[in-house]
Image (cartoon, coloured by chain):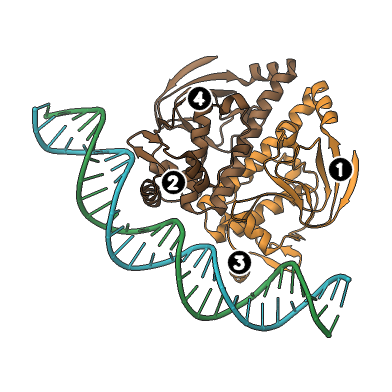
Chain colours: A brown, B orange, C green, D cyan
Amino acid sequence: MQIVAIKENQDIVRVGDNPSRSCLILSGIACTYKITGDGKRQIHNFHVPGDIPDLQSLHLKVLDNSLGTLTPCSVGFITHEALDELCERHYRIAKAFWRETLIDGAIFREWMTSIGQREAYSRVAHLLCEMMMRLRAVGLVNGSSCHWPITQAEIGDALGITTVHVNRVLKAMRADGLIELKGDRLNIPDWEKLMQAGDFDPTYLHLESHQVAA
Amino acid sequence: MQIVAIKENQDIVRVGDNPSRSCLILSGIACTYKITGDGKRQIHNFHVPGDIPDLQSLHLKVLDNSLGTLTPCSVGFITHEALDELCERHYRIAKAFWRETLIDGAIFREWMTSIGQREAYSRVAHLLCEMMMRLRAVGLVNGSSCHWPITQAEIGDALGITTVHVNRVLKAMRADGLIELKGDRLNIPDWEKLMQAGDFDPTYLHLESHQVAA
DNA sequence: CGAGGTGTTGACGATGCTCAAGGGGAGTGG
DNA sequence: CCACTCCCCTTGAGCATCGTCAACACCTCG
C-alpha cells in the first residue's frame, strides 16, 4: 500500500477517470461529489478515516463521481489488482468489502430521503447525528464533542441548501440548545434532542455493536 | 427459484425485516422506499424486470428500506443460501452481483444530485430519461415510446416534489413538446431535447454497449 | 350507480434562494 | 509588525419556487 499525504481541497480522482487503484482514508475528511451541468455541487458522502470512498471503481470501470479532500488527508492506495486477487482468494474478504459498498448505498438512500423529504433544520440535525456516530465508531469523538472541519458551504452542498440558509439553521439550532459549534469544535449537549430533531435512526449505518459504544 | 405473482401496491419486504432470500423482478415495476418520521415517503429507485432490488440484504442483515410493487409483478425468490454458495464457488458471479449493487449505488448518487441541485422541471426530465434508457435496455421500449404505469404521486415521492407540482411540470413539458404522456403511454418525441432539459448523462447507469442500442 | 384512485386547476402562503454587505481570523509579504 | 488578502461566517431585504388547501373531472371497477 502506497501512503500519500494530500492537501485540503484537492481532487483524488475525478468523474470520467478510470483508476487502477482505490484509496483508503487514513486521516482527515474527504467527500465524494458530482457537479451538475450548471455548476452546482452535490456532495454524496463525507468520508472519515477507515473508509474506502472509491471502492466501487474496482468493478465499475468509469468513475461517475469525483472524490476530493476537505482537510489535509493521509491516504493509502491499494491497486485493484491486489484487491481483486485478495477477493478471489478469500471470499470472506470479498464479502467484507462488498458489505462496505452496500453500507455506502444505505447512506445514499438515507441522504436522499433527507434531501427529498425533510426540511432544512431536520436535514442538518440528521447529518450531525450521522457524522457523530461515524466519527465515534472510529474513535474521533471525545465525550459529546469532536473536531468539525466541515464548512457551512460544504454542509449546504451535501444537503441541497444554500450556505446562507445553513447559517440561519445553525443559528436556530444553537438558540434551541441542540449544538455548540464554534470554530472547528462541535459539541452536542443533548444527543436525544438532536436525534429527535433529525428524525435519526442509525439502523442504516449497519454498525456492529462494538462500534456504537461511546 | 420460487416464482410468485404479486398484486400492485403490495410490500414484498419491509424496513426492519431480516429476509433469507432476495427477489428478482421478472415483470412489472417495483420500487424501494423509506417512510420518514412524519409519514412522508421517499422512493429511492424504480425497479424494472431484470433488477434484484433487495440484493443488498444478502450481506446487510437488517433491511433499512422497504420494497413494494407499483404494478402487478411476477418475481422470483432466490435464497441467500443459494446466492452465497454460488458467489463463493464462482468469483465471477460474485463480481457480477456485486457490480449490480454498485450500479444501484450510482443511481442513488445521481438521484441525490437531482433532488439536491436541480429544479423540479429538470428533475422530472432526468427521471424520464433514466427510465427510458433502463426500460430500453430490457426491451420494453418501442421506438420512442413505452408503457408508463407510474403515477404522478409516485414521481413526486421519487423526486421530492408534491403531486400537484409534478402535474404542473408535466403540463409545461407537454407544452414544450418534450413529452407525450396520456394514460399509461409515454412517448418522447425529441430525445435530445429531453436529455438537455434533464442535464442527463447516462454514464452512471454503466450500461454495456449492447444494452444501449435502440 | 356509487366509490375510490388519478389527474387537473386555482388561490394563497411559506420555506428557502438571491443579492448584497460587512465582520473576524489566519496567513502572507513588505 | 502591520497592512492586506482571502476565506469563512453572519445578517438583512426582497423574491421565487414550490407547498398547502380545496374543488372538480375522468375513469375503472365492484
Given contact means CB atoms under 8 Å apart, are the residues at marks 3 and 4 in contact?
A: no
Q: Nearer the viewer, mark 3 or mark 4?
A: 4
Give, as a three-letter code, the residue at label 1.
Gly
Classify mark 4: helix, strand or loop: loop
Task: Name the residue that disc number 2 marks.
Answer: A156
Disc 3 and disc 4: Cα gap in Å?
A: 45 Å
Tell me what residue is drawn at x 67 percent, y 41 percent.
B64
Give, as a three-letter code, the residue at label 4.
Pro
Left or right: residue D5 compared with residue A96 = left
Task: Name the residue that disc number 1 marks.
Answer: B76
Task: Name the residue that disc number 4 marks.
Answer: A49
Task: Name the residue that disc number 3 marks.
Answer: B173
Disc 2 and disc 4: Cα gap in Å?
A: 22 Å
Disc 3 and disc 1: Cα gap in Å?
A: 37 Å
Give, as a three-letter code, the residue at label 3.
Met
Classify mark 3: helix, strand or loop: helix
Disc 2 and disc 1: Cα gap in Å?
A: 42 Å
Q: Same chain for the residues at labels 2 and 1, yes or no?
A: no
Labelled disc at residue B94: none
Classify mark 1: helix, strand or loop: strand
| Number of other residues with Cα within 10 Å of mark 3, as a class: few under 14, some 14 to 19, many 20 or more | many
Given contact means CB atoms under 8 Å apart, are the residues at marks 1 and 4 in contact?
A: no
Residue A138 against residue B122 in the figure, above or below: above
Task: Count how many numbered circles sit on residues in the image.
Answer: 4
Q: Same chain for the residues at labels 2 and 4, yes or no?
A: yes
Give, as a three-letter code, the residue at label 2.
Gly
